[in-house]
Amino acid sequence: GLPIVQLVDTQGRFDESAGAWSGMFVKEADPLIIEDLNRRGLLYSEMEYEHSYPFCWRCDTPLLYYARASWFIRMSELRDRLIANNHTINWYPEHIRDGRFGNFIENVVDWAVSRERYWGTPLPIWICQDCGHEHAVGSVAELRQMAKELPEHFELHRPSIDQAVLSCPECGGDARRVPEVMDCWFDSGSMPFAQWHYPFENQDMFAESFPADFITEAVD
Ligand SMILES: [Zn+2]
Ligand SMILES: [Zn+2]
């Protein structure tokens, strides 16, 4: 693939590759960059104009877009099963099956499932600090069994869960959780089994109620 070129660090400052402006906050560099272009005879025109721009919805701070490393679920590998299952559903109105929803799963892409925010369902992936082995923990019992250290009042959210140091199954080194949490759609999609604590409990309840008889959806 193409290399990722990122000249701005997460503090909004130019990095070393930006030469004269390295270490400077990007917005402060704007007039200096214009001046430099002008001096070198490369500036065609300078003007202020109105355009759309992303702002934080809470505090109105102007935002910067970054290319960020993310975790993905390989949905593309499930495409055939998704299409087959879609054809077992009675859609109302019927055209949704091969229209809006059918098109969506025909063109399904891998799901960028991780989120870089504090609150959320923690991504249950621990990485060994020694050998780099990645392990996805599948249950509380497995986590307790693999743990070298657990906080005294341990529970499955941040910050508590990030104090759980696990023993690497490959080399016995210290494995620590990745910092990301999950897209909240993952929580929504877990409802059919998670509400019953399936597969650890209530196998009968789950068998009786899955798949659901009726689901209502809306366009968002
Ligand atoms: Zn904000
Ligand atoms: Zn290891």
Image (cartoon, rainbow, N blue to C red):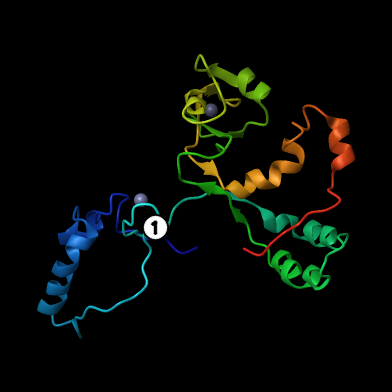
For label 1, the crowd category at 10 Å Cα-Cα, with few meaning under 14, some 14 to 19 and many 20 or more, is: few
**143 to 110, vertically: above or below:** above
Among the 4 quarters of the image, the one containing residue 204: top right
* Residue plotted at (63% across, 57% down): 110
**90 to 127, vertically: above or below:** below
Q: Position of residue 113 (x, y in %)?
A: 58, 49
Q: Position of residue 53 (x, y in %)?
A: 36, 68
* Residue plotted at (63% across, 31% down): 137
Residue type at numbered disc 1: Tyr
> Is 121 left, or right, of 60 in this rendering?
right
Q: Quadrant of the C terminus?
A: bottom right
Q: Position of residue 167 (x, y in %)?
A: 56, 21
* Residue plotted at (77% across, 27% down): 200
Label 1: state its secondary structure: loop
* Residue plotted at (65% across, 24% down): 140
Query: Which residue in the structure is indicated by mark 1?
Result: 66
User: Is the shortest distance between ligand 1 and the CB of mark 1 under 8 Å?
Assistant: no
> Is 140 left, or right, of 10 in this rendering?
right
